[in-house]
Image: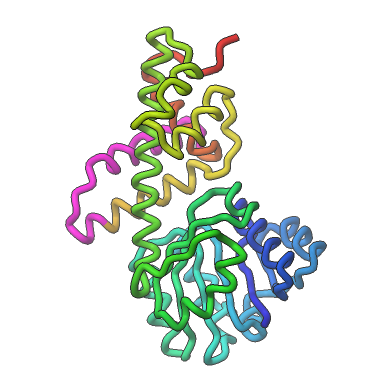
Amino acid sequence: MKLGFIGLGIMGRPMAKNLLKAGVEVLATDLNKEAVADLVSCGAKEADYAQIGAESDIVITMVPSGAIVKSILFGENGVASTLREGTLVCDMSSVTPVESRYCHDELAKKGVGFVDAPVSGGEPGAIAGSLAIMCGGSEENFERMKPIFDILGNSAILIGPVGSGSAAKLVNQIIVNNTIAVVSEAFVFAAKAGADPEKVYQAIRGGLAGSAVLDAKIPMIIDRNFKPGGPIRINHKDIKNVIDTAHALDVPVPYSAQLFEILQTLKVHGHMNDDHGGIVQYFEMLAGCEVRRPE
C-alpha cells in the first residue's frame, strides 16, 4: 500500500515519521521543502499533488484550514485530478463539518471515499503516536483507515457520518480553549493576590479543579514557556470555525464568542505563534502582573 501525506507542519511531520517507522510506504509533500527533505531522509518519497493522487491508495491531508484542503484536492493539478476510483482520502485537518461534507460529495463523484478525522493531543501526541482521533465517514472506510489510525493514535472512534469528526473536534476546541482561558484567569488572580502559583497548582490539582489542561499548561505558564505544541493561530482559526458553524446552526456560543475576542486581542499583540497556554498573557495584560515561578 502507498500512502500520500500532505502537510508536514508541527503535527504532520511527526505523524508521517511514525508511519514510516511502522513500514508504510509514504509519498509526501509540503510547501516547506526543509520538512520534505527531512521526511525523505527518513525514507519517504517526495511527490507533487498529481503524483500523490495517481499513485496512492490512501491520501492524508493535515493542513491549517478547510480552504487549503479544498485547494490541494480540487485546485488545478490537484490531488483529485488524478485520483483513481476506490482510493480513500482522509482529511485530518481541523475544518468545519460543511467543508468536510463538501470534500466528501465532490470526491464521491469520482468514486473516491472520504473520511474526516481530526485529532487531539498536540505535538507531543503526534510525536508519541498517542493522538485521539475523531472520525466521520462510513464504517467501511473507517475500518480501512483503522490500521493507519492505530499507528498515529491510541484511540480512534467513528462518531457518525462525514462531518461528525470535524464537529467532535470543534467540541474539543470549545472545551480545551475555554478551559485554558478560565485556568489563566484563575492563576492571574492567584498571582495578583500574592499566592505562589506553583503551590496553588499543587494544592488544587488533585481535587475537582484538576484536569488534563491544568496539568499540561500550568507548568509551562509558570516557566514562561510558550513554545507551541498547539499555536494560538490554529486555535484562533478553530474558534472562528466554532462560531461560524454555531451561527449556521442557530446555536448560541457566548463563552466561545468572548474567547474569540481574547484570541483576537492576542493576535493584535503578536502572540499568534505562542502555544495556546499563552492565552494567559491576555489576562496578565488586564491585571498588570505575570504568572511565573517565584525566584
Instruction: Looking at the picture, tell me which residue is in the foreground, 185 or 205.
Output: 205
- The foreground one among 208 and 137 is 208
How far across and how far down the image is residue 231, in percent? Answer: 52, 43
For residue 18: magenta? no
- Above or below residue 183? Residue 284 is above
Classified by dominant secondary structure, the portion drawn in magenta counts as: helix
Name the foreground residue: 1 vs 157: 157
Q: Is residue 134 left or right of residue 13?
A: left
Q: Quadrant of the N terminus?
A: bottom right
Residue drawn at point x = 44 percent, y = 63 percent: 66
Q: In the rendered image, is residue 290 in sight? A: no
Is 254 a magenta residue? yes
**Residue sitting at x 54%, y 48%:** 122
Q: How is the image coloured?
A: rainbow
What is the number of callouts on the image? 0
x%, y% of residue 291?
48, 19
| Residue at the front extreme of this rendering | 206
In this view of the protein, can residue 106 be seen by the observer? yes
Q: Which residues are magenta?
A: 246-271
Instruction: Locate residue 133 relative to residue 207 in the image: left or right.
Output: right
Residue 152 image offset from top left, x and y in percent: 59, 62
Residue under the image location 57 percent in, 43 percent down: 229
Q: Residue most toward the right?
A: 41
Where residue 144 appears, x then y in whole percent?
Answer: 53, 80
User: Horizontally, is 167 left or right of 48 in the view?
Assistant: left
On the image, which quarter does residue 159 sit in? bottom left
> Could you tell me which residue is drawn at 28 percent across and 58 percent down?
245
Q: Which quadrant of the figure contains the C terminus?
A: top right
